Amino acid sequence: MYCILPLKRPLPMCFNRVLKPGGEAILQVPISWKTEKTFEDFSITSEAEREKIFGQKDHVRIYGADYTERIKQAGFHLKLVDVSELKNHLKNNKILVDDREKIIVGHK
């Protein structure tokens, strides 16, 4: 959701506010670990141009490696979990995430 909204307030702060103490949140976003900083451009309104730049026609940003710092600044303790580790905990072992992906979990 927060790759499609132009935000005035960082959404992770809102998640932290409503999460109970000791709670966890999976905070996955479209991210490029090769890119140092998050790129966003609200002036791009053409669906074709958004798809070309952000990978989807309704997105306005693609997060960079600074995303983890944004999560920490929102008050979360951060844990990166391998998808393979997560799949081991699922009964049917089905999850529609690339096996090379890291799952970003925020702890309050």
Image (cartoon, grey):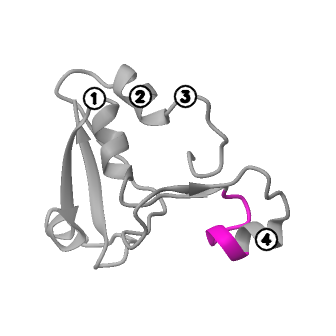
Query: Is residue 18 or residue 55 the one in the foreground?
Result: 55
Left or right of residue 65, residue 53 in this image: right
What is the crowding at mark 1: few (fewer than 14 residues within 10 Å), some, or many (at least 20)? some
| Residue at numbered disc 3 | 9
- Whether 24 is among the magenta residues is no
State the image coordinates of residue 50 (x, y, percent, origin top left): 74, 66
Left or right of residue 67, residue 77 in this image: left
Q: Residue at x 81, y 73 (%)?
A: 48
| Residue at numbered disc 4 | 49
Image quarter of the C terminus: top left
Q: Secondary structure at mark 3?
A: loop
Do residues under tags 3 and 2 come within 8 Å of each other at their CB atoms?
A: yes
Extent of the magenta region: 52-59
Q: CA distance from mark 4 to mark 1?
A: 34 Å
- Whether 54 is among the magenta residues is yes
Q: Callout 2, which amino acid? A: Met
| Residue at numbered disc 2 | 13
State the image coordinates of residue 78 (x, y, percent, origin top left): 21, 45
